Image (cartoon, rainbow, N blue to C red):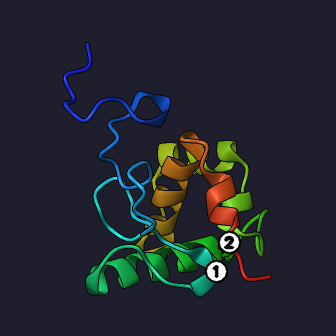
Amino acid sequence: MNTNQDGPGKNGYPAAYPAESGDTEDVGIFGDARWDPSDGGSAAAGPEGDAASRALVELANAKMPFGKYAGRYLVDLPESYVLWFKQKGWPEGDLGEKLRAMEEIKVNGLEGLVRSFIRR
């Protein structure tokens, strides 16, 4: 049952949503500006958004410093190798933090998103 007094818009969403109400401002579902990767900016306001963006780019461009896969981007490591580290124990420091993050990315199938931030 639709209780929206404005009536349904396209795809059954309330017409009050900016994309359907004629408002041309590009906003996300929470009313914030959408991130445009072409301008290198961040949708998140303030330094936290910029720090998160920089951390994602740094993670995407991180390479394995040792072992069988030395020189490979972390995102290109086999999932079984990352899970082996999880089982045996993460390396100390920055590499361990990045491998933990990469494990979450791989388990959730987000490698393609991360690869889009690699500077080749």
Neighbourhood count class around disc 2 (C-alpha, 10 Å): few under 14, some 14–19, many 20 upward: some
Residue at image x 46%, y 77%?
Answer: 53
Disc sitting over residue 38 in the figure:
1
Q: Nearer the viewer, residue 41 or 93?
A: 41
* Mark 1 residue element: helix
Horizontally, is 68 left or right of 4 in the view? Answer: right
Residue at image x 40%, y 73%?
Answer: 43
Q: Mark 2 or 1, which is nearer the eye?
A: 1
Among the two numbered marks 2 and 1 on one chain, the one whose residue lies closer to the N terminus: 1
Q: Nearer the viewer, residue 14 or 85?
A: 14
Residue 120: quadrant of the picture: bottom right
Residue 103 % position (x, y): 53, 50
Neighbourhood count class around disc 1 (C-alpha, 10 Å): few under 14, some 14–19, many 20 upward: few
Residue 17 % position (x, y): 34, 48
Q: Nearer the viewer, residue 37 or 116?
A: 37
Q: Amino acid at mark 1?
A: Ser
Q: Amino acid at mark 2?
A: Met
Residue at image x 39%, y 84%?
Answer: 50
Q: Nearer the viewer, residue 77 or 25?
A: 25
* Mark 2 residue element: loop
For disc 2, the marked residue is 64
Residue 7: quadrant of the picture: top left
Horizontally, is 45 left or right of 100 in the view? Answer: left
